[in-house]
Image (spheres, rainbow, N blue to C red):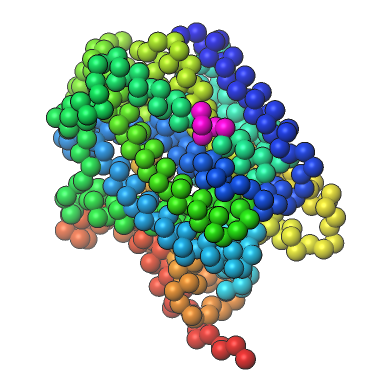
Amino acid sequence: MSASLLFSFVIGYFVLLLVVAWLTSRNSNNDSFFIGNRSSNWMLVAFGMVGTSLSGVTFVSVPGTVGDFTGNAHKGFAYFQVVIGYIIGYLVVAFVLLPLYYRMNLTSIYNYLQKRFGTIAYKTGALFFIISRTVGATARLYLVIFVLQEFILKNFGIPFIVTALIILLMILLYTFEGGVKTIVYTDTLQTTLMLAGLVVTVVYILNSMNLSVGDAMRTLTDKGYATIFNTDPKSGGFFLKQIIGGAFITISMFGLDQEMMQKNISVKTLKDSQKNMITFNLVSAGVNFLFLLLGGLLYLYALNHGAEYTQVTTNGSTQWQLITADNQNIIGDTLFPTVALQMMPQAIAIIFIIALISALFPSADGALTALTSSFCIDILGLKRRDDLTEKQQKKIRLTVHLTFTVVFLICIMIFYWIGNRSIIDKILTLAGYTYGPLLGLFAFGILSKRALPQTSLITVICLAAPVASYLISQYSAILFNGYQVGIELLIINGLLTYLGLLSISKKAVAAQ
């Protein structure tokens, strides 16, 4: 597959995004950037959010997990345990958090913490969002940029850092002016192309192997690729832990995340925003299952084209690898790119690249916009600055936007130097540490009527809880008779934060 041809499609796609951005960002102001002037169409928001929530990690990493191993068995469809939890979590967001945000008419959801507990809790919550979203977004970005680098741009002798810089500049250019107002439309376009790539690839593999969907599921089940539920209570992947953990991940990474809520509260009414959430919930669950089906089909396709499983022992540790005819290990994140670009026809390779970059941009553009919004509103207090004109506020916003682009580049390079075979698990683990304090803060505000003193102890507790959670996670097998902490790390972290806040709280004074 010609790298030059693939690169020409990347450039053409970017030009299309710039045209959409230009059309949608005309006459934009700061409110357009932050909340889309509260005039976004709920159907466009719902559909576009599918692309944002799935991202390039879902597109590349989720299919790769199916044939990976946990012990001596394939992971199979075990990720769907988490997806079941997502479904529950989205309902909590729709009917508990969204009514709260609309009732308080929030631009930044962390203003809730200010009204409930004061400035210190507010700034602490915003700070943890900035850390959480920066880490999560750059991890997702790293994976897709790595694929583009390995399969296209390194053929031109371009270093990884230059590839990362080019991609970030592309995102910066089309979000610089319109913000949320532009992203609602670009995300809709990108989600359409990403899902089209997913469906086309599934249909091609089924046809090429003469399989119906029913035949494929029976074959995957026979080979151990379609197992969903893990029934070992001590395992990190035990189904109850995965479902409950998935629900709390959604509540935290979606309902307490300015990026995702920024799009929801840009819808005019609460009712429409809730319709958006329910529609998105159903579509997202179906799409996640389709990605798992694709993962199983990709492994079958690779095995039919000469790939073989083999065990490799390194430093006393034995791992399974899936080795292709040219001696590449494609188990995990490299499965989909390798099969699509090296084993399938040119047309499928082009569709894959377009779908991949369509998966890349929605998660990155929204994160960059939301981080800019949160820093300007929550940290700098831009909306409260009556001494600044609209033009001066815009200048500050653009400076912050550019600064976060540089921060993204630094974080992406850190992930590149560290490296990782399957990054979806890493993202969920990192979320457990960074979103836990946010979960604890909001839970304390919603579930308790107690007040917090204006003290830096709030920030100290929110910093100490992830450290304590890390220690519990590392030594859980020793402390709890072989029990392994998995996705429930987020719940432990949030609970420790809640208890810490409870220890310094005081009885609220009744309103006169």
Please indicate, yes or no, whether residue 43 appears anywhere in the rendered image: yes
Find residue 7 and report its horizontal and vertical position in percent: 56, 15
Q: Is residue 354 left or right of residue 431?
A: right
Write down the quadrant of residue 299 in the picture.
top left
Which residue occupies the foreground of this view, 372 or 457?
Answer: 372
| Residue extent of the magenta highlight | 189-193
Which image quarter is the C terminus in?
bottom right
Q: Who's the residue at 43% across and 16% down the image?
A: 348
Kindly indicate the quadrant of the structure image that contains residue 489: bottom left
Q: Residue furthest left?
A: 222
Of the pair 408 and 109, the residue shown nearer to us: 109
Tell me residue 300's x, y (percent): 24, 22
Question: What residue do we see at 35% from left, 24% from top?
Answer: 202
Residue 28 lies in the magenta stretch: no
Q: Residue 156: x, y in percent?
A: 56, 12
Residue 192: in magenta span: yes
**Foreground pick, 457 / 71:** 71
Look at the picture and state if 280 lies above or below 315.
Answer: below
- From the image, give the main secondary structure of the stretch colored magenta: helix
